[in-house]
Structures are given as C-alpha cells and as structure tokens.
Image (cartoon, helix red, strand yellow):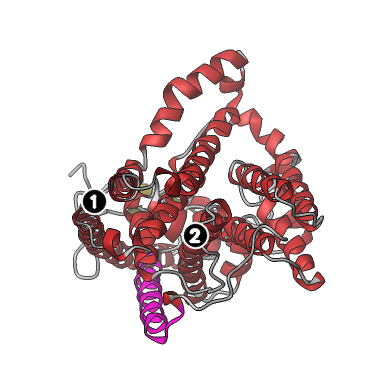
Amino acid sequence: MPHIICHDRQVAADSPFHRRQLVLAALAILVVAFVLNHFTPMVSDDYAFYLMGVSWDTIKGMYMGWGGRLVANTLPNFILGLDQPWVADLFNSVALLALVWILTLLAVRILALLDAAHPAALSVWPDIRVLLLVFALYWIANPDLGQTTFWIVGAANYLWPSVFNFGFALAFVVLLQRKSCPWWQALLVCVLALPAGCSNENTGVVTWFLLACLAIRAWRQGQRSLWPWVWLFFMGVGICILVLAPGNYAREASFQGWYDHPFWWRVMDHFVRRFPDAMFRYWEVFLALGVLVYVLKRDVGASDTGQLKGTMTGMYLLLGMACLANAVLVLAPNIPKRALLGGFLYALLAFAMVAHRVFQSPRLAGAWWVTVLCVVCGVQWVLSFGLMLRAYHGTYLQDQVRVALVRQGIKDGAKHIEIPEYYFTWLLKSRDKFDVFFSGGDMARYYGGAGVSISEYPVKGPYGAGRAPVRKDQ
C-alpha cells in the first residue's frame, strides 16, 4: 500500500520502563475487575443459560426462537457449564482489559490513517495515560456498568461481543496500513469477521460502515488489495446471520403494541424522545472530549489549523458512528440502557483518539485543563469503585443467605420458598447494579427443586450472616 506506510521505529511506548508500567496497570485492572466479578452472584438469566447447556439443539432453538446473537447465546452456556465460578470471573475480567486495550490501540491506528502528521507506530503497547483514562471513563460513564460488565449473561451480550467487534476493527485497520498481508493473517481476519458481525444488532452494522469508509479512502489513495473487501464481505455475512435470524421475528410478538403504531410515529418517537436520552447517558465522555478539544485548538490550532485536520476528521467520524449506533435502534421496540453500550464505545473511541493527540505533546499533556481532567476522572473512579465494592460485597453475603434458604426449603420438601431481595447500599449511579430480574423457576431447578416455586420479598436494609433480613412491610 504505497500511500499509508508504517514507520518502523521505536516509540516511547516501546521503552522497557513504559512496558513495566503498562503491565502493572493491566494487572491492576484485572484485579479490580476480578474482585467485583467474584462478588457478583448468579442472577437473572444466568440460571436459565446454565440449564440450557451447549448443544446443537440449544443453539438452533435460540436462533429460531430468540435471536441471532450466536456468540452471546453460546459462550455463557459453556462458561457457566464448567461449574467453576472463578472461570467466568476471570473471563469477564480479561474481556474488560482486552476491550480497553483494543480501544486505546484502535484510536491511534485510525488517527494514523487520517492524519499524515501522526506516524502509525507498530507497537502493541498503548500509551498508559490514555489507557487509564479510557478505563476510568468506561467505568464512570458506562450507561449500564453492572449489566454490561459484571453480570455473566449481560457481559456475554455486550462486553464479550464488543471485544470481537472492535478486535476485528483493529486487525482490519492494522492490515490496511501495511504494504502486504500474509495469506494466513488474511484468513484469520476472515474467521474473526463472522463473530464480529454477529456481535450486536447496532454495533456490527456501524463497525461495518466505519471500516467500509476507511477501505474506500485507502482505495482512493492507491490501495488495490482485495482483502479488505473480502473481510467486509465476511463481516456482512455475520451481520446477515444476526439480523435475519427467525428468532428476531418471533420475539416481535412480545412487543405487538409498539408495532401497532405507524412507522412514522415510531421514527418520530425514537428521535424526539429515545435518541436524545441515549446520547445523554454518557455525557461525561462528551465533557472530557470537549476539554481535550479546547486544549488542542487553543495551543495547536492557533499556530497551525491544518495540523488538526486529521484529528478533527477522525473525531467527527467516530462521533457520527456513536450517533448512528443509537439511530439504528429506531427499529427496536424496547431499548434497555445496556443496549446503549455500542454508541458509548464509539464516543469513548473518539475521546481516545483526541487524547493520543494531546499526550503525544509534552506541552499539551502538562496543560492545566488536562491535569484537572485526569484528577477528576481518577477521583470519581476511586469513589465509584469503593461504593461498588461495598455494595457488591454486601450482595455476596446476602446471596449466601438466599441460597441457604433455598437449599433448606428444598431439603424440607417445601412447595413454596420465600427469599429476601438483594439490597444495594448507596452507589454513585443506580445503573452500577447487576441485573435484578428474578426467575424463581430457573433458580429452583438449578438447585434441584423442580416444581418448587420461589418468590422474593423486599427488605428494609442489608442482611447477611448473623444479621437476619427485615421485611419492608414490617
């Protein structure tokens, strides 16, 4: 590829000292993620997916009757079926680290494609400052952190597919920057393209559109390889497998009231009510992005407006993808807050791109506004993690009481068992909770009590070993 050349040179991120720092930062992310995953009990659909197991009949049944998310509908069954809770905890933790790492690297790669003044470094070691800022913003600005990241089935629907989706995008962009591509790497990307397309209804389509824009730009600059179009084709096949699944249409019956409205009414309702709410859910990212853009335009734009053209083009492109990810949800009858993760990640990717531009200049990186941004994000993350640690540890103790009541009731031959609801202590955001949907029948079957009914009752405060639950109505 003659016009997009990777500069084969060492960068600051390649220094041994920086690598050691990155390893320590990665270990810290793994530890904090693992701790919260460990304290998250089996809840909601976890029981149902465990009971389904992994088989061809299960996969076919889900595809025909529920939806085309083959990755999300298969991985949790397998992980839960291992009966080793620490495996799911570690899997979720590694997925979170991988997603943050991928987003940080993808941002600088796209920046290198769009900004000729920014070299496309070959290093797989991202800038530690950008990595930690992306991690902090993922945590504090996530539209539904508990359900997308720590609940097993929720992570299988949003966190894990995002790793496939953006991991494929990173591989696509890296190979697009090279002059040549070995056939075995090209075939591996073809294999990765299928699960990336099956990732999510809105994210897969948006990523395909973004990569198509980059491929067209490379073609106009002289890139004549056919592999990018082959990769886009395979990703398109994955998207078709997802979108055209019979289960998607079978589920429409549950939302007949929505589909009874005229199409124009649904479009207007989405863009007047749901779309603005979706974009506002991660306002912290836009605020942080605004701070960095202000620093860039003040200190760089004043001397050379052309120098920022590639950065601003990339930022607007990625923010457009964030808007598109929420816009395509116009076809969805219901939008849970966890479904907004795709648009959020594109906004976070735009932030990472501008952050790279800021931190590559020591003068800009030391600017007062940038220092304030880093401190505010750090303090807010510490506060959020501390509150979540207390709340999740509390639910971990409560779950032991709930499980003990269920086991004892089944042992005694009870036909109906009442257990207390989870009680969350104060959190920075209500959406930091894991999913509290309750399926008593699945829980009873999981613990060997087929035919036993289980119900929940609200409580006044926390409970645990040595502290009995108190009913709210008492």
Residue occupying the point 58% across, 75% down? 8
Q: Position of residue 275 (x, y in %)?
A: 45, 29
- What kind of residue is marked 1? Leu
Secondary structure beneath label 1: loop
Residue in the picture at 55% in, 20% down: 267
Using the rendered view, name the quadrant where residue 407 is placed.
Answer: bottom left
Query: Relative to 407, is 68 above or below?
Result: above
Between 219 and 187, which is closer to the camera in this rendering? 219
Quadrant that contains the C terminus:
top left
Please, what is the three-letter code of the amino acid marked with disc 2?
His
Reading the image, the residue beneath label 1 is 428
Quadrant of the frame with the N terminus: bottom right
Our reading of the magenta stretch's main secondary structure is helix
Q: Position of residue 206 (x, y in %)?
A: 61, 42
Region of the chain picked out in magenta, as a range: 14-40
Q: Is residue 220 left or right of residue 448?
A: right
Q: Is residue 363 visible?
A: yes
Q: Is residue 318 magenta?
A: no
The residue furthest front is: 303
| Residue at the spot of label 2 | 118
